[in-house]
Amino acid sequence: MSEERTFADKLIGFVQVWGVPIGMTIAYLILMWSAETDTTGKAWMAIGLGFVYVIWYVFRLLTTNAALARALDNGESAQIIVVADRQLKKLRDPAARAPYLVARAFARELRGEWTDVLADLDAAKLDAMSPRARAIWRLRATSSRIAALVALGRVAEARTVLERDLQPDANHVLHSDAYLVANLAAGRVLLAEGRPAEAAKHLVKVRDDVRASAAMRASASLPN
């Protein structure tokens, strides 16, 4: 019975992913067969089918990115891992894989799987991405790396990463992603260094910022 359910789940997943292009292909083939037109007309139909494939691909890409962004903002670790694993199974290009590895590292950060966080971040080849595309993912990666290093007791390494990659005293634009991530990371490092009063000054900037995601604000909660 479990094997039948597994097969059914796989079948449903296949239909969800490929049902639209397969259905449209069948419909266009029937249209070409039944249409009273010459080869040129059928060629234009084929071009139209090509446009359908492009639109379907773009729609799926936007849907995947939107689902991932929503899960990241809300701190939904299970959903992040589902989306990331699905994409990582298909992608081979290092630039395309990097964001999903960073996203999965963040999900594992939420679960406290610290060694796996570092493993995913080490596997993410962010330098393969374009400078514009990698900026936000580098911020996320640095924040997760600092969180993992602090949790593993490697506080000196966390301080080095913070000052090298985030520069917490730099004049980041107020409420920007860099501003929020730098303050969150600085607060974490200061707490680990036994300086709670200084840490609170940074963490409260994240906790009370309307632009901070729910996951960021939760991470910036001050310990009792």
Image: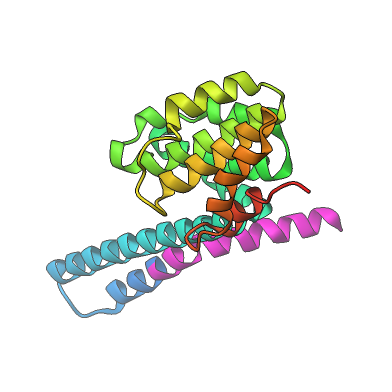
Q: Considering the whole magenta stretch, tell me its main secondary structure.
A: helix
Residue 5 forms part of the magenta stretch: yes
Q: Tell which residue pokes out farthest to the right in this image.
A: 1
Nearest the camera: 202 or 175? 202
Q: Is residue 74 above or below residue 194?
A: below
Provide residue 215's location: percent of width, then percent of height.
61, 54
**Residue at 33% in and 71% down:** 28
Q: Is residue 76 above or below residue 169?
A: below
Q: Is residue 66 above or below residue 120?
A: below
Dividing the picture into quadrants, the one containing residue 92 is top left
Q: Tell which residue pokes out farthest to the front in this image.
A: 197
Please indicate whether residue 47 sits to the left or right of residue 151 in the image. left
Viewer can see residue 207? yes
**Residue at 47% in and 26% down:** 163
Please indicate whether residue 133 sits to the left or right of residue 215 in the image. left
Dividing the picture into quadrants, the one containing residue 113 is top right
Viewer can see residue 100? no
Residue 92 forms part of the magenta stretch: no
Provide residue 106's location: percent of width, then percent of height.
60, 42
- What's the coloring here? rainbow
Provide residue 55's location: percent of width, then percent of height.
32, 64
Nearest the camera: 38 or 157? 157
Magenta-highlighted residues: 1-24
Please indicate whether residue 223 sits to the left or right of residue 168 in the image. right
Nearest the camera: 94 or 212? 212
Placement of the N terminus among the 4 image quadrants? bottom right
Provide residue 66's location: percent of width, then percent of height.
47, 61
**Residue at 49% in and 30% down:** 124
